[in-house]
Image: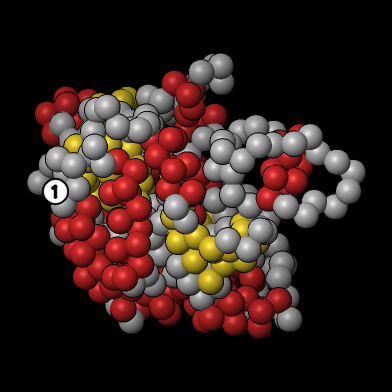
């Protein structure tokens, strides 16, 4: 790792200087790799010292279209020259168009705009509870939401209340009640957990932070069936898995299943601005009335303009097809490493969890070694590398990344 010097009062000139500045002045709520990025284009970034790196993480799927995609930059620049914020106190000329186009793309009826993924999840929780009281008839204050163990839906106080990750939970209580946790992929456990008070089942179609975990075949269809049988909403968190990442528009599409509500984020802002949304049926989202929920920046003109450009890119199907085809190539290359320093490869499309075999480097150590080889990746938990390159990546660039992984895990 790069040695970190004490920060000086002079303007930083090297990566080490910038890192020292960050370490001194910023709250240590992240543990970034010692790389200071100053430029990005497509699948590549350049640090302040002029070294180029292949981006094998793409901002946890926020950069599905790569760095500075020309269509997205053009939309942002054009809107920056007009108006960037009105608040929802007024209409603006991008909002209704964005909502219509996103609803049409996702096959839903209405859109609730927010900023971050966690805000979208919090919004879906509020909507599900209100729907349970007003439509299902659950007694006031008793609604329950069933969630999966090893989930990751954000880090707000309500969301960490149902996390099973003690790093996210420890010392942040008291926790919000109203959640029941069951094992991911266990149909029987889910069925047993649903009661007359259950408002919704909140599920990731593929668990991201847990290590790119794909559920057993038929599980997501079983979730839908259990929800239908018990008048319960199905909420799909597609913040990481959605918008082309897995080879379909939405990861749930692989199961041929539709949710009542979807939470979207990350790639919806094109890697330029934070944009999130809850999309779904009017009969569910329509329980919200003016004054009950909102966001000053949610659905702002700049966000909507960029979001509309994202929708246009996805509407062609090009990026979903790239993820399917190149994802197949990525997984074939990674699976060749199984038995050669890799224990297992999980995932779908251009999204993979690479489980390093026992005795190999830990995830953090592996990430640092990859950075030294010019490939940016990041660990999740102790022994998993998460691989999520931009959907604009080429087969040749995939080879560069996988070859680097092979070097650092080989026996």
Task: Give the residue drawn at x 30%, y 56%.
Answer: 403
Query: What colour scheme does the image use?
Result: secondary structure
The reply to whether residue 259 is visible in this rendering is: no
- Residue behind mark 1: 221
Q: In screen coordinates, is 24 left or right of 196? A: right
Quarter location, residue 327: bottom left
Quarter of the image where the N terminus is located? top right
Measuring from the top left, give residue 362's x and y in whole percent: 37, 31
In the rendered structure, the answer to whether residue 391 lies left or right of residue 410 reads right
Q: Indicate the quadrant where residue 109 lies.
A: bottom left
The crowding category of the residue bearing disc 1, from other C-alpha atoms within 10 Å (few below 14, some 14 to 19, many at least 20), is some
Q: Position of residue 215 (x, y in %)?
A: 18, 42
Residue closest to the far right: 9
Of 325 and 404, the residue lying toward us: 404
Q: Nearer the viewer, residue 359 or 155?
A: 359
User: Relative to the observer, which residue lies in front, 40 or 189?
Assistant: 40
Query: What residue is rendered at 13% in x and 34% in y?
Result: 187
**In the image: residue 151, left or right of residue 194:** right
Q: Is residue 396 above or below residue 119?
A: below
* Position of the C terminus by quadrant: top left
SS category of the residue bearing label 1: helix
Q: Is residue 59 above or below residue 28?
A: below
Q: Measuring 59% from the left and 49% from the top, which residue is drawn there?
A: 35
Count of numbered tags: 1
Q: Nearer the viewer, residue 24 or 106?
A: 24
User: Could you tell me residue 113's position as x and y percent?
Assistant: 53, 59
Q: Give the residue displayed 54% in from the left and 51% down from the top.
A: 116
């Amino acid at each position: 790792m790069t040695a970190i010097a004490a920060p000086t009062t002079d303007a930083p000139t090297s990566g080490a200087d910038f890192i020292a500045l960050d370490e001194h002045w910023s709250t240590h709520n992240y543990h970034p790799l010692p790389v200071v990025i100053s430029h990005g284009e497509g699948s590549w970034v350049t640090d302040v010292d002029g070294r180029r790196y292949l981006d094998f993480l793409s901002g946890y799927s926020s950069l599905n279209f790569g760095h500075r995609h020309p269509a997205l930059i053009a939309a942002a620049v054009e809107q920056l020259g007009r108006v960037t914020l009105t608040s929802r106190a007024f209409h603006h000329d991008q909002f209704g168009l964005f909502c219509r186009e996103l609803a049409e793309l996702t096959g839903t009826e209405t859109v609730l705009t927010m900023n971050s993924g966690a805000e979208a999840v919090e919004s879906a929780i509020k909507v599900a509870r209100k729907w349970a009281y007003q439509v299902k008839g659950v007694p006031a204050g008793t609604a329950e939401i069933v969630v999966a163990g090893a989930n990751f839906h954000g880090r707000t106080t309500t969301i960490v209340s149902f996390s099973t990750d003690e790093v996210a939970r420890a010392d942040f209580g008291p926790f919000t009640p109203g959640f029941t946790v069951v094992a991911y992929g266990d149909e029987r456990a889910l069925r047993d957990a649903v009661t007359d008070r259950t408002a919704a089942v909140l599920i990731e179609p593929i668990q991201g932070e847990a290590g790119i975990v794909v559920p057993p075949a038929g599980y997501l269809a079983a979730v839908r069936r259990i929800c239908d049988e018990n008048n319960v909403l199905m909420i799909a968190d597609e913040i990481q898995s959605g918008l082309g990442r897995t080879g379909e528009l939405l990861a749930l599409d692989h199961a041929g299943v539709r949710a009542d509500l979807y939470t979207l984020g990350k790639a919806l802002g094109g890697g330029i601005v934070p944009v999130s949304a809850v999309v779904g049926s009017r009969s569910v989202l329509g329980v919200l009335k003016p004054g009950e929920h909102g966001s000053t920046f949610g659905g702002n003109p700049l966000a909507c303009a960029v979001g509309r450009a994202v929708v246009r890119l996805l509407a062609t199907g090009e990026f979903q097809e790239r993820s399917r085809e190149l994802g197949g190539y990525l997984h074939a290359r990674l699976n060749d490493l199984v038995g050669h320093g890799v224990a297992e490869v999980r995932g779908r499309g251009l999204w993979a969890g690479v489980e390093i075999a026992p005795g190999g480097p830990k995830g953090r150590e592996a990430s640092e070694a990859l950075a030294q080889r010019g490939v940016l990746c990041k660990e999740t938990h102790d022994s998993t590398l998460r691989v999520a390159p931009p959907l604009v990546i080429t087969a040749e660039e995939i080879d560069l990344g996988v070859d680097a992984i092979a070097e650092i895990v080989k026996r």
